[in-house]
Image (cartoon, rainbow, N blue to C red):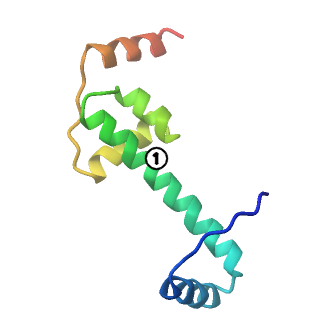
Amino acid sequence: MVTTSVRLPKEIIEEIERLSKEEGIDKGTLIRKLITESLREYKIKRALELYRDGKVSLWKAAEIAGITYREALEELRKRNIPFKYDLEDLEADIKWAMK
């Protein structure tokens, strides 16, 4: 692991300390957990925005987000993003099915 530092407001530090006590884990573990969850959410949100804007296919969005195609479909549903199925998607599906 690599060590890094960041300045945080007192309120956030107090909340982290409170939560770490509630969960019975040390602050470092909680911070790593929060950062990991936030990075995953950020990647999914960013990838689905690219998909929604028509810049990438859903296959590519799933790849960018680091999730499966099926998980990407579920995320679309959760976030009320319309599913678009175009020629590029059809070609990708056929290519995958032919493997």
Q: Residue at x 52, y 87 (%)?
A: 10
Does 1 appear above or below 97?
below
Quadrant of the image containing the C terminus: top right
Does 9 appear above or below 65?
below
Question: Which residue reaches farthest right?
Answer: 1
Q: Which residue is drawn at 50% across and 82% down?
A: 9
Q: Does 8 sit left or right of 91 as displayed?
A: right
- Where residue 33 sits, quadrant-wise, is bottom right
Q: Residue at x 44, y 52 (%)?
A: 42
Relative image position of residue 37 (x, y in whole percent): 53, 61
* Location of mark 1 (residue): 43
Residue type beneath disc 1: Lys
Relative image position of residue 43 (x, y in whole percent): 46, 47
Quadrant of the image containing the N terminus: bottom right
Q: What element carries label 1?
A: helix
- Where residue 90 sits, quadrant-wise, is top left
Comparing 76 with 26, the one in front is 26
